[in-house]
Image (cartoon, rainbow, N blue to C red):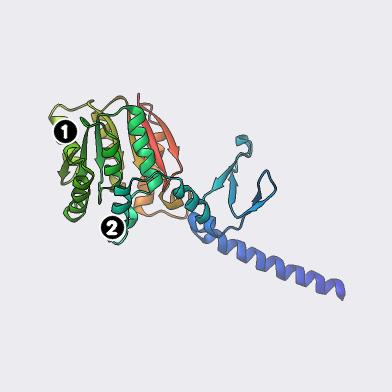
């Protein structure tokens, strides 16, 4: 009798566990990562509320990487050297519709550093919004530098232009209002192919492949193209998510992986950025 009760109880617990696990795996990958409790001990044996992940494939030697939790991300942001003018723009944009489109301060800092490392003089940005990333790039450019900023939304551009002027970089920024593809094609027709050092793309996801092909014509050998949102909130790795934007980014990432015209590095910063160097 007792053994029968134990067996029934075990079966009940097992069934409940299976249902819980099934429900957990029905969530998108980004939500599963958020919900999964995880702790690890540091070298000093203090327990930290932080997640560690490792690749399922054992050929990667079970290398563990840190998942960025809110407290850890706050720490990262406290270690970003954000100029005051960028802070003001970020805070004004936070109250606007679509503010989530703005790059994060740590992303902007990386963009500015890459411009400086490259010694860039001529840059392109596709998708300006209110100008946070383009302002970071313009501030990093030398006085003789030039940034072609492609954006179609007039209201957003008004905010961007206001901060270009406040920061004293208006003379470095050439705004191209309209469809970015048309603006890039015009630059090519004007004989500007292979004359740019750096490009940043943060706009319509379903147009990524077209923008990339146009920019590859405009960027010189050794120049850099950076694509934002390549991890798309984790959706690209979740086979249960198959909306048009996710599929577009997934396909773009696959094509880029196989593209021998560029060297690439996918960086898990912000929503994921891929840095491409033209060979």
Using the image as rendered, state which of residue 264 and residue 82 is in the foreground: 82
Farthest bottom residue in view: 1
Q: Residue at x 22, y 32 (%)?
A: 143
Within the image, what quadrant is residue 218 found in? top left
Compared to residue 144, the image places residue 26 above or below, namely below
Using the image as rendered, state which of residue 27 and residue 143 is in the foreground: 143
Badge 1, how many Cα within 10 Å: few under 14, some, many 20+? some
On screen, residue 9 versus residue 180, left or right, reads: right
The C terminus lies in quadrant:
top left
Q: Position of residue 114 (x, y in %)?
A: 36, 33
On screen, residue 67 versus residue 230, left or right, reads: right
Using the image as rendered, state which of residue 150 and residue 78 is in the foreground: 78
Compared to residue 138, the image places residue 13 above or below, namely below
**Element type where label 1 sits in the image:** helix
Compared to residue 183, the image places residue 271 above or below, namely below
Q: Which residue is mark 2?
A: 92
The N terminus lies in quadrant:
bottom right
On screen, residue 24 versus residue 247, left or right, reads: right
Q: Which residue is mark 1?
A: 187
Q: Position of residue 263 (x, y in %)?
A: 40, 28
């Amino acid at each position: 009798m007792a053994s029968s009760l134990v067996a029934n109880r075990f079966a009940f617990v097992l069934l409940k566990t299976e249902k819980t696990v099934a429900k957990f795996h029905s969530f998108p990958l980004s939500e599963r990562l958020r919900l999964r409790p995880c702790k690890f001990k540091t070298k000093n044996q203090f327990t930290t509320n932080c997640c560690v992940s490792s690749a399922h494939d054992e050929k990667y030697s079970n290398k563990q990487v840190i998942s960025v939790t809110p407290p850890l991300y706050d720490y990262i942001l406290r270690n970003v050297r954000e100029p005051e003018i960028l802070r003001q723009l970020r805070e004004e944009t936070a109250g606007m519709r679509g503010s989530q489109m703005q790059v994060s301060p740590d992303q902007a800092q990386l963009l500015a550093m890459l411009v400086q490392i490259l010694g860039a003089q001529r840059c392109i940005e596709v998708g300006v919004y209110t100008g946070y990333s383009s302002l970071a790039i313009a501030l990093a450019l030398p006085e003789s530098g030039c940034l072609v900023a492609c954006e179609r939304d007039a209201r957003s551009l008004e905010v961007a232009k206001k901060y270009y002027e406040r920061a004293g970089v208006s003379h470095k920024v050439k705004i191209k209002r309209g469809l970015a593809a048309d603006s890039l094609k015009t630059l090519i027709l004007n004989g500007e192919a292979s004359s740019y050092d750096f490009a940043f793309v943060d706009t319509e996801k379903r147009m990524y492949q077209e923008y990339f092909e146009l920019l590859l014509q405009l960027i010189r050998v050794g120049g850099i193209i950076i694509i934002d949102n390549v991890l798309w909130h984790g959706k690209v790795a979740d086979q249960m998510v198959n909306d048009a934007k996710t599929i577009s980014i997934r396909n773009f990432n696959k094509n880029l992986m196989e593209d021998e015209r560029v060297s690439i590095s996918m960086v898990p910063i912000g929503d994921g950025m891929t840095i491409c160097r033209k060979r």
